[in-house]
Image (cartoon, helix red, strand yellow):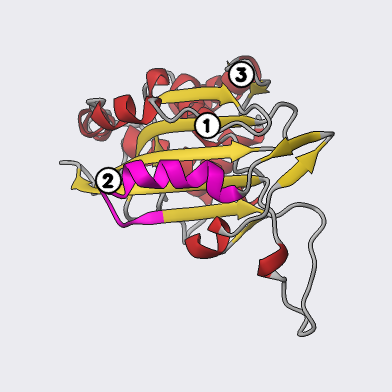
Amino acid sequence: MPTEFTLEEVLEGKATSIKGKDYLPTRGYIEPFLERVQKLTSDIRVHVKLPDQITYNKNGDIDTADLTFNRVWLEAVLPHEYQYANHQQVIGMVYGLDTRKAVVKMYSGALNSACTNLCVFNPDSLVVNEIEPETPIDFNPITRLVKQTTEIGVTLRRFAETYFDYTNKSFVNEHLGRWIRNCMSESVDNGFGKVKLATSTPIDAYKLLFDKKDSPYLISDDNANMFTVYNAFTQIITDSMKKDIMNQVEKTLLVNSILTL
């Protein structure tokens, strides 16, 4: 499960050896990223997954002076806000040392300021590379990602203008069935294993749209559009971060295919 640590604490993460391969201290992986994005923003959000083995101090607290971080996700939220629905551009990186192959992913997208759900629509907005032992990460793609012009605001506006006929049971049933079938067939593979959305994802999104009375995505005449549907799906992905911080971008990209947007 992702655990909350400050950026300063994460920077102190120790070097580690996994399956006979030696990897740099955490600082060696994330400081070059910070040097690039902190020129643009001070809003840096960090998520980590602790290794299976940790130590505790005499007070029973996690000993942060003796930690290594095998999986780290940083989000640099840029100050510019998009024209639609309060979305802010984000430049992110996530890396994993204890995955099948050590991997780093860099991406450009947007965060919904209200719920922190991630939006990524363009596969070119994601760069995936292997991490070699004792070797710094190549952060040259960050320059392109920062300069990359996106049309996220335009895309989200199109979603908001696309009506979802929630009162038509046949319409809803057809779409739910299509979404489930698409989850079975669609995947993203960047050379580090297939990423898929579980077939339970559309069902969980359906519950947010139709069943849960306290859901912020409960569909009505006021919000009967694909923007609401899209956010119900991305909320499920955000919630799944409790188990998986490595594949959030790929899962978000899959939503576009699942919904046939």
Magenta-drawn segment = 26-44
Residue 160, labelled with which disc? none
Q: Say which quadrant the N terminus sits in.
A: bottom right
The three-letter amino acid code for the residue at tag 2 is Gln
By secondary structure, the bulk of the magenta-drawn segment is best described as helix
- Identified at 34% across, 41% down, the residue is 36
Query: Residue visible at 66% across and 51% down?
Result: 69
Question: Which residue extends farthest left?
Answer: 83
- The image shows residue 175 at horizontal and vertical percentages of 49, 24
Tell me: residue 165, above or below residue 83.
Answer: above
Q: Residue at x 65, y 27 (%)?
A: 132
Residue linked to disc 3:
181
Q: Pick whichever of labels 3 and 2 is earlier in the sequence.
A: 2
Tell which tag, 3 or 2, sits nearer the viewer: 2
Left or right relative to 172: residue 55: right
Please state if 117 lies on the left or on the right of 54 as rendered: left
Question: What amino acid does circle 3 point to?
Answer: Arg
Q: Secondary structure under badge 2? A: strand
The residues tagged by marks 3 and 2 sit, at their Cα atoms, a distance apart of: 32 Å
Q: Splitting the image into 4 quarters, where does residue 226 fall?
A: top left
What is the quadrant of residue 179 in the picture? top right
Looking at numbered disc 1 in the image, what kind of residue is underneath it? Ile
Q: CA distance from mark 1 to mark 3?
A: 38 Å
Which residue is identified by label 1? 137
Q: Is residue 36 magenta?
A: yes
Residue 19 pos. (x, y %):
84, 34
